[in-house]
């Protein structure tokens, strides 16, 4: 089977593995991308948390909040230069504030009225394209209700930046105290990018995929099957601790898990509290930009 340069490029971006390793992995798996990723991981060449298409699009992530809810939106532009444009920043900030009055879906936000313009958010963005001279779009939005903390990382202006996080905490206690610990947890989420809130929220297919990889790795040790099963369960527990928010070591105090840190904060909150949801938007997640020089480099390696 012929392996194309674009396949090698995609696999390298997805795993961080070398070009020749990627070419071999694709050859061994008949060009199946997911199987090739697993093949590299089983060989210890690729990392689990590397994902395809991490090259960021430009634009801004914006957050807005009130006493009962909070939203995060992402508006993309073609260049970082536009993201530093005050008119574009005002546009994103306004879109975020408008989103607070909707259910948070992209469709609802796009159809909502843009303040003082007599037109929808969607049309206001189209007008901005003509004014600013660069293509842009409302890519996604989300809303959480309750005592919701917000955090913006790499902020370029008030409530605008490269990463936006929402963390919702359910409690009958002091909402401001809940938001205070929630903001610290939101900073943690920005840093660690959890896959899920807890084990029950993980995609069962993703868990089974990890189990299969751990099983192959464990059996390569040559140990008895009973020992291998314990090795697999141990690695799965470690996997949960790495990807589930409540089980992660709290970045602000690594001696505690996030769950334990929230439990400790209940003294200030004055009542039991739990995290019900979180949202993390990193600018351009999953949006690919063309990289012609890199493609040429890969093509040369494939031909070699």
Image: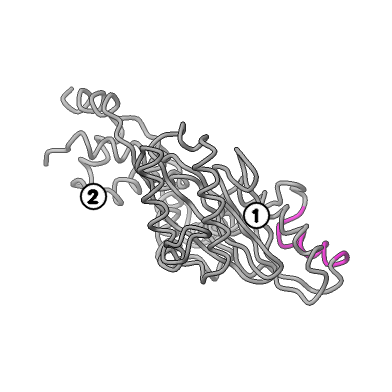
| Part of the protein shown in magenta | 256-268
Q: Residue furthest left?
A: 1
Query: In the rendering, at what x and y percent does residue 23 appear?
Result: 24, 35
Name the residue located 78 percent from the left edge and 77 percent from the top edge: 172
**Residue that numbered label 1 is attached to:** 248
* Label 2 close to label 1 by CB (< 8 Å): no
Name the residue located 65 percent from the left edge and 66 percent from the top edge: 168
Which is more toward the observer, 230 or 142? 142
| Viewer can see residue 239 | no
Which is more toward the observer, 175 or 191? 175
Query: Looking at the picture, does residue 259 appear above or below residue 26?
Result: below
Q: Main secondary structure of the magenta part?
A: helix
Using the image, tell me which numbered label, if any, was put on residue 137.
none
Query: Looking at the picture, does residue 65 appear above or below residue 32?
Result: below
Which is more toward the observer, 88 or 298? 88
Query: In the rendering, at what x and y percent does residue 178 appear?
Result: 77, 64
Q: Residues within 10 Å of mark 2 (few under 14, many from 20)?
A: few
Q: Earlier in the sequence, mark 2 or mark 1?
A: 2
Q: Residues within 10 Å of mark 1 (few under 14, many from 20)?
A: many
Residue 148: quarter of image: bottom right
**Residue that numbered label 2 is attached to:** 32
Query: In the rendering, at what x and y percent does residue 290 appear?
Result: 29, 34
8 inside magenta stretch: no
Name the residue located 77 percent from the left edge and 48 percent from the top edge: 253
Q: Left or right of 55: which side holds 147?
A: right
């Amino acid at each position: 089977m012929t392996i194309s340069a674009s396949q090698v490029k995609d696999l390298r971006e997805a795993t961080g593995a070398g070009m020749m390793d990627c070419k071999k992995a694709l050859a061994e798996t008949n060009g199946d991308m997911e199987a090739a990723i697993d093949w590299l991981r089983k060989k210890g060449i690729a990392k689990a948390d590397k994902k395809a298409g991490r090259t960021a699009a430009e634009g801004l992530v914006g957050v807005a909040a009130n006493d009962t809810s909070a939203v995060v939106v992402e508006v993309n532009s073609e260049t970082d230069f536009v993201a530093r444009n005050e008119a574009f920043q005002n546009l994103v900030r306004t879109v975020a504030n408008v989103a607070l009055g909707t259910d948070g879906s992209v469709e609802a936000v796009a159809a909502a009225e843009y303040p003082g313009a007599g037109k929808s958010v969607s049309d206001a963005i189209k007008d901005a394209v003509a004014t600013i001279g660069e293509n842009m779009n409302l890519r996604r939005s989300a809303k959480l209700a309750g005592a919701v903390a917000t955090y913006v990382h790499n902020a370029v202006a008030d409530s605008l930046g490269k990463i936006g996080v929402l963390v919702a905490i359910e409690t009958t206690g002091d909402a401001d105290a809940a938001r205070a610990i929630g903001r610290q947890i939101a900073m943690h989420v920005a840093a660690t990018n959890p896959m899920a809130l807890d084990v029950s929220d993980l995609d069962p297919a993703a868990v089974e995929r990890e189990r299969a990889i751990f099983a192959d790795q464990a059996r390569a040790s040559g140990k008895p099957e009973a020992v291998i099963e314990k090795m697999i369960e141990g690695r799965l527990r470690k996997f949960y601790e790495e990807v589930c928010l409540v089980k992660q070591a709290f970045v602000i105090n690594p001696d505690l898990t996030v769950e334990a840190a929230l439990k400790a904060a209940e003294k200030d909150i004055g009542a039991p509290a739990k995290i019900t949801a979180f949202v993390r938007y990193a600018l351009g997640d999953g949006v690919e930009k063309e990289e012609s020089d890199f493609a040429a480099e890969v093509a040369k390696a494939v031909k070699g």
